[in-house]
Image (cartoon, rainbow, N blue to C red):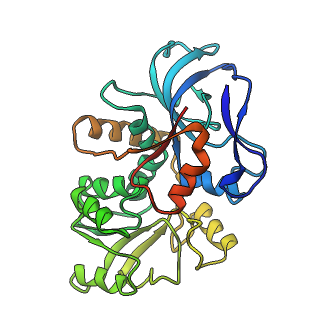
Amino acid sequence: MKAIEVAHFGGPETLQLVDKPTPEPGKGQILIEVKAAGINFADLMARQGHYPPVPSAPFVPGFEAAGVVAKVGEGVTHWKTGDRVVSMVSNGYAEYALADAATAAPVPDTLGFPEATALLIQGITAYTLMTVAVPEIQGKSVLISAAAGGVGSLAVQIAKLLGAGMVIGLASTDEKRAKVRELGADAAIDYTQKDWAERVKEATGGKGVDIYLDASGDTENGALKPLAKGGHWVVFGAQQTSTRGLPESELMGMVFNGQTLRGYTLYEASPEVTAAALKQLIAWTGEGKLTIIANDKFPLADAGQAQQAIIGRKTTGKVVLEP
């Protein structure tokens, strides 16, 4: 099978298309013929050697995949060849990927494979940021960074669905801010402007926001200024485009240890919580309450270009590879 391999830690050029043996599903596993492999910031960090769960290279990146079941392993009775499925994986940038049969989820015929991948890491992260990482969201004001991105575009909608009082999205271009408002945000603000924090406070009548969901962890970009008294700044990522802030060792330690300000990672949520979150997300999508943006699709061989497009902020919503 064709797969993308990171031979050594480094830039996008380290992503190389190679031939690998097609894996065989073991006990309790299924083999997925990948139709869409989701790309996340965790992939970019892993490629650079900055993601603790991936301590060494070479490796095949990709933590999520959607497609059809190609084979089932011993003991698997609730999946059959041809079933549409989405799952967390450990080698998603490939034509085939192994998945735990117990944690995989069915993909309705009404949901495309690229859209299905958006509901995994990014969708579940967006949902649990507001159900696990913060004490209460009902009636609260919520500020969302990178609001036109994969997590952000879903978080804007989920905040509203969970009863947030006000949702403000941060985005860098007129087009992206228009999309953020279209998704339901009460306000969309250009975070590249020096006065962005003051504009957030103005939007809240001078009070500031109760919750700031931040994907960058950039402490020198006024991140504390828009917070209301007693507000929560939740850092759930350390984007490599951020060049300022806490030293990386401290920032990533904060994120993965769930420390205050408040670091958050999906690993903090239990399997039961993530399964319930995915079920709710799929239900909302089927009911037409959740819009998934997944228009940025790249061939498997162009994995490096896809990651570079994300770094350059040239994408909106979910970005996938299509083997």
Q: Is residue 104 at all visible to an observer of this figure? A: no
Q: Can the viewer see residue 78 in this picture?
A: yes
Task: Name the spot of residue 3 as percent of width and height, x first.
Answer: 66, 34
Q: Please identify the quarter of the rendering in which residue 222 is found.
A: bottom left
The quarter of the picture where residue 174 lies is: bottom left
Q: Nearer the viewer, residue 140 or 71?
A: 71
Q: Is residue 266 above or below residue 171?
A: above
Residue at horizontal 54 percent and vertical 66 percent from the top: 263
Is 24 displayed left or right of 140 in the figure? right
Image quarter in which the N terminus is found: top right
Question: Residue 72 in the image: x percent, y percent?
Answer: 59, 15
Question: From the viewer's perspective, is residue 157 above or below residue 227?
Answer: above
Q: Where is residue 124? Give x, y as percent.
A: 43, 47
Q: How many marks?
A: 0
* Along the line of sight, the residue nearer the viewer: 214 or 23: 23
Asked if residue 26 lies left or right of residue 279, the reply is right
Horizontal side of residue 318 vs 16, given as left or right: left
Q: Which residue: 30% across, 79% down? A: 200
* Quarter of the image where the C terminus is located: top right
* Residue at 45%, 59% in the rendered image: 314
151 vs 58, nearest the viewer: 58
Residue at left offset 58%, top offset 64%: 255
In the rendered image, residue 121, in percent from the top left (x then y), is placed at 49, 46
